Image (tube, rainbow, N blue to C red):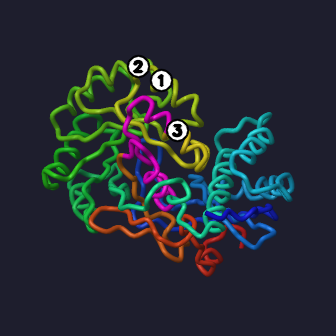
Amino acid sequence: MKHQKLTLRSLSAVAVTVPMKLPLGTSAQTIKEASLLLLDLKTHEGVEGRGYAWCYQAGIARSLVPIVAELSDVLQGMTVAPLDLAQIVARHFKLAGLAGPLMMVASPVDTAIWDALAIAANMPLATLLGASPRPIQAYNSNGLGLISAAAAADEAEALLVGGFKGVKLRLGRAGGLTHDLEAVRAVRKRLASDIHLMVDFNQALSFADAMRYGAALDGEGIYWIEEPIRHDDYHHMALLAQATTTPIQIGENFTGLQPMAAALEARACDYVMSDLDRIGGVTGWMRAAGLAAAYNREMSSHLFPEVSAHLMAATPTRHWLEYVDWANPILQEPIEIVDGNAIIPTRPGHGMMWDMAAVKKYRLDK
């Protein structure tokens, strides 16, 4: 295998806001547009790499563009080596704290580095990571927000197009447990028995309420309960995991390995999921995958299906890929779903190329 040495020439970013087909209604807020930071890495050898961050708010995406430009000046001329550059980026952001929006810069930079290396090696990212590209089972996480029970049932059925064997329903309605159970039962009744139903509270509950909800949801045909309480309350999450027969899923808010290790040590969950932005890009993901394997926990992805599919192929305890189509409007070739599986593209790198006409249409600084 021949590896081409790459030298970083520049980093640049564009902030875009693209429409979502279905709004994401959660207990925290309803999001109708996807605010993304699109990051491009160029090398002196002509190889390029890409990554993007999901920024939740347009203002956050816009604010990160000049930070990427400053980081470009720091990294310019350095060898494109993921582990070395990850340490340099972490040191650069150390005083401000490498978390939150700054992690939304560091992670896509790392992803773009790995993309460039895979392109230079003329192989898919999954192959560069030592795995064979394979179909990855996915559940559909578009929509299914805090809507009426009848509307949720209709939407759940529509989301099965493409052969999905799982969908995610958000809970935490203002009407309380009665309204949430109504939605769960309406959706579960509409779905065939072999379709998995995941539910996500987005940290909406107190511990006392979570114990009550957990007992009520046991026996309702739920595949997992995601983030019922504050994401970093591992002590009470562990008590909840012990009390419920329905598995507890957490992890999208792990910022690096330390929180993940603490959660696993506390036995706070039955499953874990990693978010490409928060875990530290491809480098952080691979470390997290090793930790999940050490604790024998099945590991799923959170968002970013285009890159996460490659990473799931290289994850020893791979579980479910979370599929969302939020980046599709700015991609030349969105990831393909066949029979409920994400199909890893065979082209070099992770396979993402920006649709520049769409980027121009949706960019925030036009």
Query: Residue 300, image x and y in percent?
Result: 40, 45
Q: What residue do we see at 35% from left, 67% from top? A: 337
Q: Are marks 1 and 2 in contact (CB under 8 Å)?
A: yes
Query: Residue, x 22% and y 44% (percent of image)?
Result: 184
Rendered location of residue 14, percent (x, y)? 69, 66
The amino acid marked with disc number 1 is Asp
Residue 118 percent coordinates (x, y): 61, 63
Q: Is residue 337 left or right of residue 216?
A: right
Depth order, front residue of 159/28: 159
Nearest the camera: 60 or 357? 357
Q: From what the image shows, is residue 340 above or below residue 318?
A: below
Q: CA distance from mark 1 to mark 2?
A: 6 Å
- N-terminal label among 2 and 3: 2
Q: Residues within 10 Å of mark 1 (few under 14, many from 20)?
A: few
The numbered disc on residue 335 is: none
Element assignment for label 1: loop
Which mark is on residue 236? 2
Position of the C terminus by quadrant? bottom right
Is residue 311 rendered magenta in the image? yes
Residue 57: % across, % down? 60, 53
Q: Residue type at mark 3?
A: Ala
Identify which amino acid the numbered label 2 is placed on.
Answer: His
Disc 3 marks which residue? Answer: 288
Whichever of labels 1 and 3 marks the residue nearer the N terminus, that label is: 1
Residue placed at 13% from the left, 55% from the top?
192
Q: Residue at x 22, y 36 (%)?
A: 178
Extent of the magenta region:
290-318
In terms of image quadrants, where is residue 218?
A: top left
The residue at which mark 1 appears reads as 233
Q: Is residue 66 left or right of residue 215?
A: right
